Image: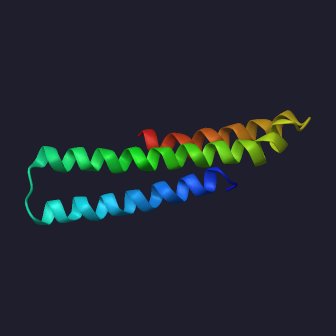
């Protein structure tokens, strides 16, 4: 992963790590369920941003190389790889 995506991803991962620790504590302390869900969604949002940073970085590096190839099969393999890797989080 290249900067600025790498530094942004690291920042968000550290925030998500803290958020998950907070959610765990809330569950252990039997906090209100909707408050737990709200905090869980905040952590998920941070992780989705990390996924976006990874995609942008990948497109700027590997994507530029793979999509400029003359071999259509290699392009197709690359595109399918992207779709598979970056749609898992939406399931």
Tell me the residue at 53%/47% (across/down): 51
Quarter of image, res 63: top right
Tell me the residue at 19%/65% (across/down): 25
Q: Position of residue 12 (x, y in %)?
A: 47, 54
Q: Position of residue 65 (x, y in %)?
A: 84, 44
Quadrant location, the N terminus: bottom right
Along the line of sight, which residue is nearer the eye, 24 or 90? 24
Along the line of sight, which residue is nearer the eye, 67 or 25? 25
Along the line of sight, which residue is nearer the eye, 79 or 48? 48
In the rendered view, how is the structure colored?
A: rainbow
Q: Is residue 77 left or right of residue 53?
A: right
Q: Is residue 2 left or right of residue 24?
A: right
Q: Is residue 34 left or right of residue 38?
A: left
Q: Is residue 39 left or right of residue 74?
A: left
Q: Position of residue 29 (x, y in %)?
A: 9, 64
Quadrant location, the C terminus: top left
Tell me the residue at 15%/60% (across/down): 27
Exactly how many numbered labels are in the figure? 0
Q: Residue furthest right?
A: 70
In the image, residue 15 sits, relative to residue 89, either above or below, namely below
Quarter of image, res 3: bottom right
In the image, residue 90 sits, relative to residue 54, either above or below, namely above
């Amino acid at each position: 992963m290249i900067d600025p995506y790498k530094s942004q991803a690291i920042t968000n991962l550290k925030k998500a790590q803290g958020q998950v620790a907070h959610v765990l504590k809330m569950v252990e302390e039997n906090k209100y369920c909707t408050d737990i869900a709200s905090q869980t969604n905040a952590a998920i949002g941070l992780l989705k941003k990390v996924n976006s940073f990874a995609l942008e970085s990948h497109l700027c590096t590997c994507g530029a190389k793979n999509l400029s190839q003359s071999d259509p099969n290699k392009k197709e393999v690359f595109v399918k790889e992207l779709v598979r890797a970056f749609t898992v989080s939406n399931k």
